Image (cartoon, rainbow, N blue to C red):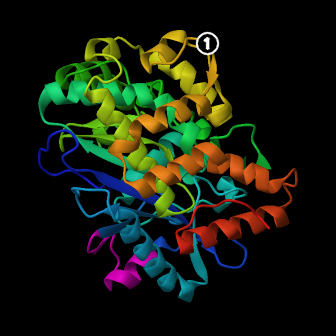
């Protein structure tokens, strides 16, 4: 189900990346639940995973979403966007026979999840069916959210503590460069990152599963089990008496620890308009994490002192306002080396980006610079709408996004 790290690696030695895409009708752009047909065609039989060399394909909980992932951990991000792009084109070729294609961005803009959701009905179906019984997976937070996941390795408690502390600090900044979901139900929601706003509520029935999205300040495997996993298991048991759901998969924080594979998976990133944009954002986040883990901003002990509640408050603002969110917390600004007067998240990213240049390849750096300058994909979509949220206008913009996916070029404007 994930691009896993099957053996222990040290910090930043390898990386795993996952990209999720909607499958839609080529003419109407309505979601089209044919992932099972896609995988069956590729493999010659019904499967839930298809090995296509450097990239693997797999199903998700709903049948209109396909996940592309690195086929195991890779040593470098260099050239990875081209591998993903090649697979996008191959999938689109297969989907032609179903009059379907892939559509980027983190949420379908006008899908009605209560009438259009179709769960995956094959392997792992008992797990998905149980999720559906507990949570009702027809909502946007289950059936209409596509993201980019980053899997980063650690070896032992010491490296876990270093990596977890750094990841927790950057989570509030991620929507300010990666939000791509301003629309749900055919209208602007008022949130730049509507996917994350829906995501943080999709398991309100059992609050311990997602927590505050920002993980708790825990820095060892034993502490993680005691403070996070144990509570999840206790709370899910009345709904899952047979123990079908594994606690490591249940954990839905914005970054989840996978001790079974020695990795932390970052899950807050909305998928973008093309793999080139996705991998540029991945490179940017990894570069910032490298500097944090080296102690370039503040020492580890100071990083670990941040509670999830304080970070969550900042995250809520960037989920709603994206790059225009105003960061008021003077201590958060100070940790990055900025003056303690309020700044927008965009201004903070403009300050941070030059510091990351030596850690990134030139194309990724330039692409993130474009995003920071022109705005998140959400903001660019809103600008392209220009006040017109009619279905006709939305279809025109999202067709252009589908062209961005095909050409692997960043979305800039609508003619």
* Magenta segment includes 374: no
Closer-to-camera residue (102/368)? 368
Residue 209 drawn above or below residue 359: above
Rendered location of residue 249, percent (x, y): 33, 42
Rendered location of residue 51, percent (x, y): 27, 73
**Residue 415, quarter of picture:** bottom right
**Residue 340, quarter of picture:** top right
**Residue 250 seen anywhere in this rendered image of the structure:** no
Mark 1 falls on what kind of element? Answer: loop
Residue 37 drawn above or below residue 84: below
The residue lying at 18 percent from left, 40 percent from top is: 262
Residue on which disc 1 sits? 341
Rendered location of residue 203, percent (x, y): 51, 35
Closer-to-camera residue (348/186)? 348
Residue 345 drawn above or below residue 92: above
Closer-to-camera residue (40/212)? 212
Task: Please provide the residue range marked out in magenta.
Answer: 36-54
220 sits left or right of 368 in the view: left
Rendered location of residue 403, percent (x, y): 62, 73
**Residue 208, quarter of picture:** top left
The residue lying at 16 percent from left, 52 percent from top is: 6
**Residue 212 seen anywhere in this rendered image of the structure:** yes
184 sits left or right of 55 in the view: right
Residue at the extreme bottom: 97
* Magenta segment includes 50: yes
* Crowd band around label 1 with a 10 angstrom C-alpha radius: few (<14), some (14–19), many (20+): few
Residue 34 drawn above or below residue 216: below
The residue lying at 55 percent from left, 74 percent from top is: 407
């Amino acid at each position: 189900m994930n691009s896993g790290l099957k053996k222990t690696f040290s910090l930043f030695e390898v990386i795993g990346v996952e990209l999720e895409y909607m499958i839609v009708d080529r003419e109407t752009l309505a979601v089209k639940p044919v992932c099972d047909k896609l995988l069956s065609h590729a493999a010659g039989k019904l499967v839930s995973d298809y090995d296509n060399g450097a990239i693997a394909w797999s199903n998700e909980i709903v049948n209109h979403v396909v996940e592309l992932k690195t086929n195991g951990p890779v040593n470098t991000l260099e050239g990875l966007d081209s591998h993903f792009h090649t697979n996008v084109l191959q999938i689109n070729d297969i989907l032609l026979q179903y009059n379907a294609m892939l559509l980027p961005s983190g949420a379908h803009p006008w899908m009605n999840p209560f009438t259009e959701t179709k769960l995956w009905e094959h392997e792992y179906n008992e797990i998905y069916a149980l999720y559906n019984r507990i949570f009702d997976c027809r909502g946007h937070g289950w059936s209409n959210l596509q993201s980019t996941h980053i899997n980063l390795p650690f070896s032992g408690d010491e490296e876990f503590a270093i990596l977890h502390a750094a990841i927790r600090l950057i989570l509030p900044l991620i929507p300010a460069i990666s939000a791509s979901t301003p629309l749900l139900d055919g209208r602007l929601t008022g949130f730049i990152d509507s996917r994350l706003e829906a995501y943080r509520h999709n398991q309100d029935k059992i609050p311990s599963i997602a927590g505050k999205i920002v993980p708790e300040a825990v820095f060892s495997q034993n502490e993680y089990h005691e403070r996070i996993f144990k509570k999840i298991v206790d709370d899910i048991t009345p709904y899952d008496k047979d123990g079908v759901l594994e606690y490591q998969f249940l954990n839905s924080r914005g970054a989840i620890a996978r001790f079974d594979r020695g990795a932390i998976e970052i899950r807050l990133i909305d998928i973008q308009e093309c793999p080139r944009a996705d991998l540029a954002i991945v490179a940017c986040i990894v570069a910032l994490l490298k500097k944090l883990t080296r102690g370039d901003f503040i020492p580890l002990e100071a990083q670990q002192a941040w509670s999830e509640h304080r970070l969550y408050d900042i995250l809520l603002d960037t989920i709603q306002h994206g790059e225009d969110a105003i960061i008021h917390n003077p201590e958060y600004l100070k940790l990055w080396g900025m003056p303690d007067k309020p700044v927008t998240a965009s201004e903070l990213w403009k300050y941070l980006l030059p510091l990351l240049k030596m850690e990134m390849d030139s194309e990724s750096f330039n692409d993130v610079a474009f995003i920071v300058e022109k705005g998140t994909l959400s903001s660019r979509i809103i600008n392209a709408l220009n006040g017109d949220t009619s279905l006709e206008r939305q279809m025109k913009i999202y067709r252009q996004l589908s062209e961005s996916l095909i050409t692997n070029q960043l979305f800039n404007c609508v003619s």
